[in-house]
Each structure stands twice: as C-alpha cells, then as structure tokens.
Amino acid sequence: MATADEKEDVLRDKEIFNEQSSSASHSVDDVQSHTEANIMPETETQLEHLDEEKGTLGKSSTVISAMDPRSFPDGGLKAWLVVFGGFCCIGVFQDYYQTTLLRQYSPSTVSWIVSLETFMMFLGGPFMGKLYDNYGPKYLLLVGTFLHVFGLMMTSISTEYYQFILAQGICSPIGASAVFYPALSAVATWFFHRRALAFGIMASGSSLGGVIFPILVQNLIPKIGFPWTMRVSAFLILGLLIIANLTVKSRLPPSPKPFSLMAFVKPLSEPTFALLTLGSFFIFFGIFIPFTFIQLSGQSLGMSVQLSNYLLAVLNAASIFGRTLPGYLGDRFGRFNVIVVLNFFSALIILALWLPARGNAPILVFAALYGFGSGAFVSMVPACLAQISNIKEIGIRNGTIFAIVSFAALCGNPIAGALLGNGTSFTKVIIFAGVVYMGGAVIFLLTRATLVKWKIATKV
C-alpha cells in the first residue's frame, strides 16, 4: 500500500513529465530543478479497445509504462531476492604481503596490488554496463563468477610480485566487475521510492564480508598457510555467487543498441552528472586509504598486532549500519541531503580524529565512525546517480562514472604509500586522505546546488 508521501512523489513525477512533454526545447537546467528524477520516460499510454457490451470503439483503461514510478514494485519477494543476490556479491592483504610474502618491496609497491584490484573492477564499468543494457545480467554473472574465483585460486599458488598482479590485481577483479555491475543495475529496476535503502542493503554485503574475511584470513594463515586460506576464501565466495546467479534478475528486458563511445561521454554534458562524477573522483582518491593503512597506523602507535588485526573488522562492521541506515534516511529526507552531510562528517573525522590519535581508543573510535560515514558514500552514490538518470541508461551511466573514478582508486593508495615511504609517521598520509575527501564533499554540495540551488530545507 503506497504511503501519502509516495503518492505525492508520483503526482509530482507526473507533473514533471507533463512539463517535459509540453516543450521539446525544455532546458537541462529546468529539468534538473526537480528532485526525484531529471529524466522521466513516458508514463502512460492511452489505447483504444472494443467495448464488448456496446460493440463500440472506446478508450481503454490506462496502460502504465514499465518505466513509470508506479510500476516499480519497491518490495515483494522477487525484488528483495534481487537485493539479496546483490548482497552476496562481495585491503586485508596489505599487511600480510608487506611483512611476509613481499617484504622486500616498499609499502607503495605492495599497495599497487590492492589499488589495481579496485581499478580493474571499476574500469570495467563501461563494458559491463553496455553488455548489461544489451543482454541483461545472466551471462555476465556466469562469466564473472568464473573469473573472480579463478583469479583467487591462482593467487593461492602465487609467490612472485607479478603473479599477484596478474591473479589478484587483474583476473579476479575483472570477474568481480562482471558481477558487481549487473547486480547494481538490476536492483535499480525494482525500486524507485525505496531505492537508496535497497542499494544500502545490497552494499552492506561487502561490509559483512569485510568483517568476516579479515578475521578469517588472519586466523587461518597461521594454521593452514596462505595458499589454503585463499582457497577457503574462494570457495566461500563461489557459494555466495551461486546464490547471486540464481536470484539477480532485471525487471526490464534488455534493450540492445549498437556500441557508441559518445553514449558514455554524453552524460558528462549534464552539469549535475559531471559534478557528481568529479566529487566521487576526489573522494575515491582518499576513501580506501584508511582501509589499507589503518592496521599499520595502529601498530605504529603501539597497538598490538592481535588488536590491530580487528581494526578492519570494526571499520566494516560499522559500515554495515553506514550503508543501510543512511539509505533509509535518504529515501525519506533526500539522498543528496544525506550524502552531503556524511561526506563532510567523514572528511572531518579523518583530520580531527585519526590525525591527532595517539593511542588505541581514538583509533578504534575512528575506525567505527569512519566505517559508518564512508559506508554511506559507497551505498548512496548509485542511488543519487539513479535519481538523476533514465533507468534505461543506468548501465551506461554507472559504467561512465565508475570508469572515471577507477583512476582515482588506482592512484590513491600508492600515493599514500609513497608519502609513508619506509617511515612510521602517517601524518602526511592522513592529511592527504582528509584533504581530498574534503574536496569531494565540497563538490557534492555544489552538485546538490545544481538541483535546488541553495535551498536548505528541500528534499533532494
């Protein structure tokens, strides 16, 4: 049963569409002034039918388009199964590689493995997005499952730096990319009013994995060794991806179109999309730095190795709530409103809490608070993107933004590693992470301004 707020949203969306249909020259700025979506497809079509009782030709009942906000289930078994499948699609190795397998290499060199992993997963966005729009999620999920698990299995027998690069840095993340984008795009087709919450629940799967896998890896390596630890992890991921293959489906049929490079470039002509991409680029420069270096940072301040091994688990546990609760609040009070506030929050605690930390307690508190704040960013960006996009182009637009931010994700950790060098002071690393995150937060504020200018109390 639709709530009063949802009915008002639908009525407003219909008004938006009618305004857009009345003038072919409707400007981009005018379109973007609306808060729920800047591109609304056809909402309803009037058909004629034969009146069986009177034998006359008359108007039929309204046929609602699959793209109409009212046609999105926003719940139900099928919709939540898709979210659950996405939930199953899920920097723990930096410390182990640096101190054991690759101890002859600098932190900056070792961090290229983790950064390349993120880069390859995001860089695949345009290709996976286009394949998703043309063929749907089925075959992408199958191929992605094989490559992701195969890469992890090959990592288990790796001993040289180049082998880790090929297996964990290239093969596995290409598979992860083929799993990530179909799940992301499919969920968007099932939810409209509760979209941010759905994305948040889906994204919380990686946070739960981030709680389980660091503890699993740190405890299994001393007992069964690195190779079998990687194989155990790969088999667990295989089981989860089998569930994803069975449950992730798009509500809309594929719409094949010829490949066009301009299709990926065109969204950047929209000021809101361009600023959203630029803000995400800056934040991705710094967002993974705490994930990669918080354990080493804690140890440099005197924290025991055993306790520092749980820092990543604390961070990811808090991220579960950071990815779900802000999603609910975003649907209720405005997705851009929530993400702007939490972006500033995350940037501030990097500079005001992690930077001056001198003991175990502030590091642990920072891990929890940062996990919550950064988790909101990860889950809210897809919801904000879907809000300003035509759902028929969601694959391409997801691909464009994530391909661009992949370069920031690639360079962020190695730059932080170079700033650290062989020393034990993390001051430069933390300042770098905080400044780029703050820059991204400011750009997100400007992104919101393109939608409603500087109106504070407006839901957007």
Image: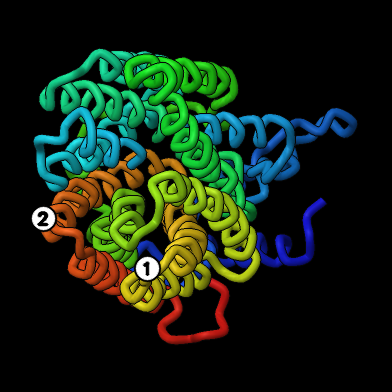
Tell me where residue 276 sits by quadrant.
bottom left
Eyeballing the image, is 144 above or below 209? above
Q: Give the residue at mark 2.
A: 421
Question: Percent from the top left, x then y, of residue 6?
Answer: 71, 61
**Residue 356 vs residue 292, the one in the foreground:** 356
Q: Which residue is rendered at x = 37% and y = 62% of the image?
A: 24
Tell me where residue 300 sits by quadrant.
bottom left
Eyeballing the image, is 433 above or below 186? below
Local SS, label 1: loop
| Residue 167 visible within the image | yes
**Residue 79 vs residue 11, the one in the foreground:** 79
Local SS, label 2: loop
Task: Find out whether the residues at labels 2 and 1 contact each other: C-beta distance under 8 Å.
Answer: no
Question: Percent from the top left, x then y, of residue 284?
Answer: 28, 56
**Residue 308 vs residue 288, the one in the foreground:** 308
Q: Which residue is rendered at x = 19% and y = 59% of the image?
A: 424
Q: Give the residue at mark 1.
A: 26
| Residue 447 visible within the image | no
Q: Is residue 202 left or right of residue 354?
A: right
Q: CA distance from mark 2 to mark 1?
A: 54 Å
Q: Is residue 259 left or right of residue 303?
A: left
In this view, the mark in front (2 or 1): 2
Q: Which residue is rendered at x = 48% and y = 30% of the image?
A: 216
**Given the image, on which type of amino acid does mark 2 rest?**
Gly
Question: Percent from the top left, x then y, of residue 81?
Answer: 65, 30
Dot placed on the residue nearer the N-terminal end, 2 or 1: 1
**Given the image, on which type of amino acid does mark 1 rest?**
His
**Residue density around tag 2, few if under 14, some if 14–19, many if 20 or more, within 10 Å:** some
Eyeballing the image, is 277 above or below 180? below
